[in-house]
Amino acid sequence: MSRAEVVDALRGGLVVSCQAYPGEAMRDPRTMVQVAQAAVAGGARAVRLQGVEDVRLGVAMLDVPVVAIWKDGDRGVVITPTLDHARALAVAGARVVALDGTRRPRPDGRTLAETVRALRAEHDVVVMADCGSLGDALAAADAGVDLLGTTLAGYTDERERTDGPDVGLVAEVVAATGMPVVAEGRIHTPAHAAAVLAAGAHAVCVGTAITHPTTITGWFVAALAPGRRPGEG
């Protein structure tokens, strides 16, 4: 598919993020790709995978676009932080490469625009910017990305973290840029997903609430904690 066809294929659909953290029982490329296969069987239009090995295996085993990231580090810019990270994901076969789309300094000293230009000069991939604010989204749009994500809303200093998805930011970015926006971040229920789509999102990305059993189990355990009344949680 062309870049435009990949973007269009996501319209109105669900992207499922299949990730496990280092040290967790599910932190294995084959396990993550099997989770992704189950998500595709349920109707996911694309999957988001973390790391070169997961992406390479996912591209080989899935018939939907892979949105690829590479998390490296534990503070600041960690989502596909450098051009070299992005290149590696493209070489692994990703159709969409997602980058940190904030205006924070990048570890390799390049701007987002420089990273996008260099990546596109070598690889015909859709570039997604994971943003934390309207200012980030406007700058990412100017940098030439194809998709804007609200992934980092509430995880930088520019916006307070909402209890659920930042529906307001989705609406603001859509209105200000007119670009396809992938709503992502704290979308924990089907109602949340419907709300961001109604706010103008091009697509909806859900991770934890579908693919992270440790967190989901914790939600239920917390709901059963002493002192909670029936119906709470």
Image (cartoon, helix red, strand yellow):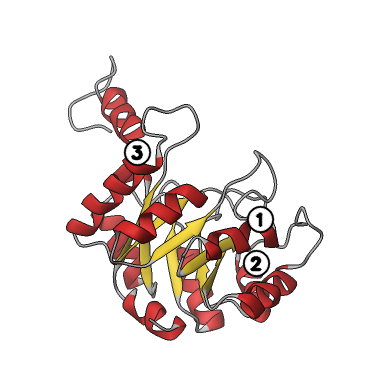
Q: Which residue is mark 2?
A: 136
Question: Which label sits on residue 158?
Answer: 1
Mark 3 residue crowding within 10 angstroms, few (<14) / some (14–19) / many (20+): some
Please tell me which of labels 1 and 2 falls first in the chain.
2
Q: Secondary structure at mark 3?
A: loop
Image point 66% across, 80% down: which residue? 121
Q: Which of the two residues, 93 or 216, is positioned nearer the viewer here?
A: 93
Q: Is residue 207 above or below residue 92?
A: above
Q: Position of residue 231 (x, y in %)?
A: 19, 33
Please tell me which of labels 3 and 2 falls first in the chain.
2
* Mark toward the viewer: 3 or 2: 3
Image point 30% across, 57% down: which residue? 61
Image point 51% across, 51% down: which residue? 52
Q: Which of the two residues, 163 or 63, is positioned nearer the viewer here?
A: 63
State which quadrant residue 2 falls in.
bottom left
Q: Amino acid at mark 1?
A: Glu
* Mark toward the viewer: 1 or 2: 2
Q: Which of the two residues, 99 or 34, is positioned nearer the viewer here?
A: 34
Q: Position of residue 13 (x, y in %)?
A: 29, 69
Q: Are marks 1 and 2 in contact (CB under 8 Å)?
A: yes
